[in-house]
Image (tube, coloured by chain):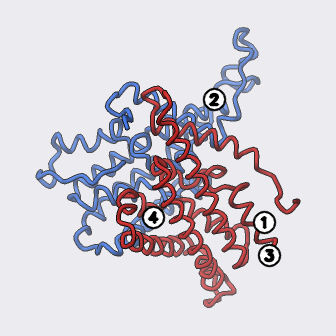
Amino acid sequence: MADVQVAEKTSSFGFGKAERKLLTDPLESNNPVTVQVLGICSALAVTTGMKNALVMAVAVIVVTALANLITSLLRNAIPKAVRMIVQLIIIATLVTIVELFLKAFSFDSYKQLSVFIGLIITNCIVMGRLEAFAMANKPWRSFLDGIGNGLGYGLILLLVAFFRELLGKGELFGMKIIGNTGDYMLNTNEISWLGWYSNNNLMVLFPSAMFVIAVIIWVHRAWNKDLVDIS
Amino acid sequence: MGELINIFIKSAFIENLALSYFLGMCSYLAVSKTVKTAFGLGLAVIFVLGITMPINWLINNFLLSESGVFQTDLTFLRLILFIAVIASMVQLVEMIVEKFSPSLYNSLGIFLPLITVNCAILGGSLFMISKEYNLSESIAFGLGGGFGWFLAIIAIAAIREKLKYSDVPAPLRGLGMAFLLTGLMGLAFMSLMGIDPSAF
């Protein structure tokens, strides 16, 4: 669970060991999805294909980093009683900007992702990092923390999407890789020992995303013993 | 009345927000370690859903729709207004819980403000719009959806409490098992899809 981290006394814009840690920690030992349990809903919804996952990851990185930066700049001016509304307005504004940007420059992915881009507002990673980090830290560090957590989220998103798209539809980024008809690159009907293989539609459904993330957590924690739940 | 009960049952069991649509998963997985905290969060979700649903219905029909006060189509403001209503309701719940049960307030921690970004709440409001419910139906839908989410989080919390006595492989303990369990429960709930409660 995310704890409030206390800022160390470092220079405002330095990029030393502590700052590098802010970027690399969320990738592995403090990953937002598999360790902090944030942003699961969208990780389930957009991971049916690699392309959607990639666009979503970039959008979340931008929103998290900028929302962290703005909130951190305003952190001493926000009264505690209305902080959530202020934070949500910041997030909603940034999400609207990202949505309009995608609409203007990448209309295809906008059409495919339209609902889910709006749902970045309710992606708990953004709000979770604002509450846990940006409200208590200087702007530059908060900005780096936002980028780091966005990257950690994107990493898991792409990993889950890789398995779901490849095993479910036999495709990667929409390219037909493996399947049992002629238009796939690897036609399993032509390889004698692979004739049994067919794409598993269960992987496209929601529950399978849970199973894939569970396996990722299993492998991750088997490798990094510090994360094992001892309670 | 029978119609309202049908909507309640349908939204609680057949179209369960947590296990059929996988909405509100962050708090669902993180706060389901013990039945006691899960119970508190579940009640808070029922309360917030039950209140925000009719308020959002009124906003949507009297402010944003073309037949509303302003006589113009303002539906592009829907997301921002809905989230503002939800945020203020959650802030209210937070103040009430902090005042009357500090221990529950501490154990819910960051996940109490995160009800705001619990997709089940915003998702519920958007479902209500797309299903074109009227005011009383939307209250039944809100309470039913909240009740279904409440039952789902209690169920997984109870299973996780029992799991403490099982010999789970160490790396899978806690969060990993919770993901597997939710996936299995979701598979089970998929079999309920398509049942029509009005047929009984």
Q: Amino acid at mark 4?
A: Ile
- State how far apart marks 2 and 1 are (Cα): 39 Å
Secondary structure of the residue carrying tag 4 is helix
Residue A144, percent from left and from top: 27, 49
| Image mark 2: chain | A
Q: Residue at x 53, y 57 (%)?
A: A117
To which residue does mark 4 refer? Answer: A97
- State how far apart marks 4 and 2 are (Cα): 35 Å
Residue A93, percent from left and from top: 43, 68
Tell which tag, 3 or 4, sits nearer the viewer.
Answer: 3
Q: Amino acid at mark 1?
A: Asn
Q: Amino acid at mark 3?
A: Met
Is A184 situated above or below B82? above
To which residue does mark 1 refer? Answer: B6
To which residue does mark 3 refer? Answer: B1
Instruction: Respond whether the residues carrying marks 4 and 2 are from the same subunit.
Output: yes
* Mark 2 crowd level (few <14, some 14–19, many ≥20, 10 Å Cα): many
Residue A183 picture quarter: top right
Is B171 situated above or below B26? above
Mark carried by residue A167: 2
Mark 4 vs 2, N-terminal side = 4
The chain that appears blue in the image is A
